Image (spheres, grey):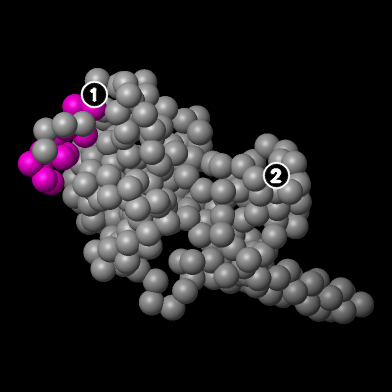
Amino acid sequence: MLRAKLNSISRSLIAVAVLLLAARLATAQTGQPGRSKWFLPWDATGYQGYQQPSRPPASPPPPPSTAPSPQIYTLQVTALPQKYEENPNAALVVAHLPDDARIWFEDKPTKETGSLRQFVSPPLTPGKNYTYTVRVELPEAGQWVSQVHSFSVHAGDIHCVDVIPSDARAVDKEVAANLAKLDPEVRKAAEEQRFCAVQEGIRLGSMGVPVKVMVKGHPVYLCCKGCEEMAKANPDETLEKVKKIKAKNTGSSSP
């Protein structure tokens, strides 16, 4: 009788161990429990992600508005074909970042840490289009760098935010495709400016169709809508930066 009970307990313990192992395997494959059905960008064969051997000083990083733009890496936002079934009236953002990276949504800092982070949006109206702006600050070549990315969001969406190495040829192709969507006259002006007036070193067209804003009566081009508020809040600085960019690109000194 005692032996039968012990055998029963042993079988139960083995079953629990198998379930725990299966759950751990699912987590290892996808980065999150119970999400093995998702095909995440960083699970793709041949994926190349963030790899930095060095870290900046341990002191707190500077504000993202003053940190330079990344040159080795770039932000990638991918919309998954699956829907967020747990809450169809919200959107889920899964971020795959360096452990010590910092992330903001709509200029609001987040507290989550680690290489895999999940963020659930407030309730969204089904069928309505929203635009989210994400800002990530991360270590690159021994210093803190910062990049902004804007993307469309709908209720039930799942988006992945990832840090990947920059590929010059891929960037050139994306830039050409996005600039081609502009009217010829606007496109010519954007090509003359070439770089964002807010985020130093970010090419116009590398983060979607460039955004045109008027600053003190002058047309200024930005890499994304997330830079618009900063450009208008610092008009003199923005125009001076455009002047320097044009002088470097074409020898023109006009904004």
Quadrant for the N terminus, please: bottom right
Q: Is residue 233 left or right of residue 128?
A: left
Q: Which residue is mark 2?
A: 128
Residue displayed at 49% across by 40% down = 133
Q: Amino acid at mark 2?
A: Lys
Residues packed near mark 2 inside 10 Å, few (<14), some (14 to 19) or many (20 plus)? few
Q: Nearer the viewer, residue 170 or 25?
A: 170
On screen, residue 161 above or below 122:
below
Q: Which residue is mark 1?
A: 237
Residue displayed at 65% across by 70% down = 37
Residue 103 in sight in this render: no
Q: Secondary structure at mark 2?
A: loop
Residue displayed at 16% across by 39% down = 245
On screen, residue 119 above or below 174:
above
Q: Is residue 247 magenta?
A: yes
Q: Amino acid at mark 1?
A: Glu
CA separation in Å, label 2 and label 1: 35 Å
